[in-house]
Amino acid sequence: MTAFNQKIQTLLDKGQGPAARALDKLPRLAQESLAKILGYSYQYPDLDSFTKCMMAVQIKQGRIGFIGSDPIDSRRQFDTQMLAIRQKSTEVDSVEDIRLPLQSGTIFARHYHPAPNKKLPLLVFYHGGGFVVGGLDTHDEVCRILAKYAKVQVLSIDYPLAPEVSPQHLIQSCEDALAWVYQNRRQLKILKNRIAVAGDSAGGNISTVVAQRSVNKPYAPQAQLLIYPTVDFKSRHPSFYAYNEGLVLTDSDINYVTQYYATQHNVELDDPIISPTYGNLRKNPPAFVITAGHDVLHDEAKIYSYKLRQNGVKMHYEEYPDQTHGFINLTPISKKAKRYTIEISKNFRKFWDKNS
């Protein structure tokens, strides 16, 4: 093992973002070698080598999965991890935290505008985190990239989290936020009332559930961007068994999410409020669906995209084969993750323009 690799391993053990960025610059073969040295034993030959190294470090530190038996502690740890990898943020001309006085209760949001003097479409963004963790800060960089490269306004919603609130309350807050945007479309200077919804993981679930519920309503979104969404709590598909160990999202995470979001609130696993794949898909807005090749949620999201198309929904499906769940959160430390997230942003805007 070279002295450089030893230094990288020492810094990684401390969880420092600069070390991860240094690791990202190594050739793929060097990353593969380091992953083995760090003890990564899972057989995922097509998985991105940088991801293997990062997962090896997390496993070595005992940080397996991101949701545990204590939701509050899980939030603290997730926030800490996201803060540790943060670097200089992508520049967006205007970023403002605002308060949304909704019928379901007042919540906070963060408004991003890449060109405040121009009218632009607006993307309502719901963050991921298994409905249990995450917030405005954990997904700040993602929203900045979306705003800059999709050339849209972004309103990131700080919705209430489970298990403290039920799915009905959580979804109502998110739908109310969408309605608030529509009601304030003139003040927000939204171009031609163009409003879409977007989210990653749990946020993708929220986005498409809200889209289903708002069909035929004045504030129905014109498009939906679903990044590795969870859409089926009831079924277990082959990808669940193929990728439920040694990666960001584990079977343990899924079990805790199911407990906190469904079981504790007596919600059936095939209820469309948590499993939109069983909902009414007709007249849903055009959908841009992203999956990661090494993800327990891969198959359910792919099946959902097929169901949407079968129901007459305009749809684009894109898979990133070498990535795993959560890759858009790695943009501060992974050039590839950032490149992919920029690509998603640009391509979604093209899709939205084409299908609006």
Image (cartoon, rainbow, N blue to C red):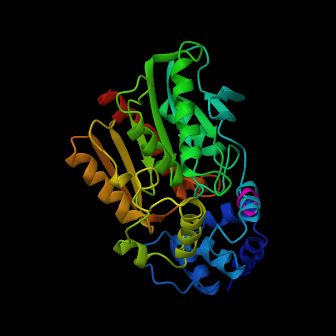
As drawn, is 96 to the left or to the right of 217? right
Q: In which quarter of the image is the N terminus?
A: bottom right
Is residue 96 visible from the viewing direction of this image? no
Where is residue 27, by image quadrant? bottom right
Relative image position of residue 15 (x, y in whole percent): 75, 68
Numbered range of the magenta stretch: 77-81
Relative image position of residue 220 (x, y in whole percent): 41, 29
In the displayed image of the protein, which residue is found farthest to the front?
266
Q: Which of 187 and 160 is in front in this view?
A: 160
Asked if residue 3 is among those painted magenta in the image, a careful observer would answer no
Q: How many labels does the image show?
A: 0
Is residue 183 visible from the viewing direction of this image? yes
Q: Which of 115 and 352 is in front in this view?
A: 352
Above-or-below relation of 12 to 119: below
Above-or-below relation of 75 to 121: below
Relative image position of residue 99 (x, y in whole percent): 71, 29
- Residue at the spot 62% in from the left edge and 71% down from the top edge: 65
- Residue at the spot 20% in from the left edge and 48% down from the top edge: 310
As drawn, is 85 to the left or to the right of 172? right
Above-or-below relation of 129 to 6: above
- Residue at the spot 71% in from the left edge and 28% down from the top edge: 98
- Residue at the spot 75% in from the left edge and 54% down from the top edge: 83
Main SS, magenta residues = helix
Relative image position of residue 148 (x, y in whole percent): 55, 33
Where is residue 144, by image quadrant? top right
Q: In which quarter of the image is the C terminus?
A: top left
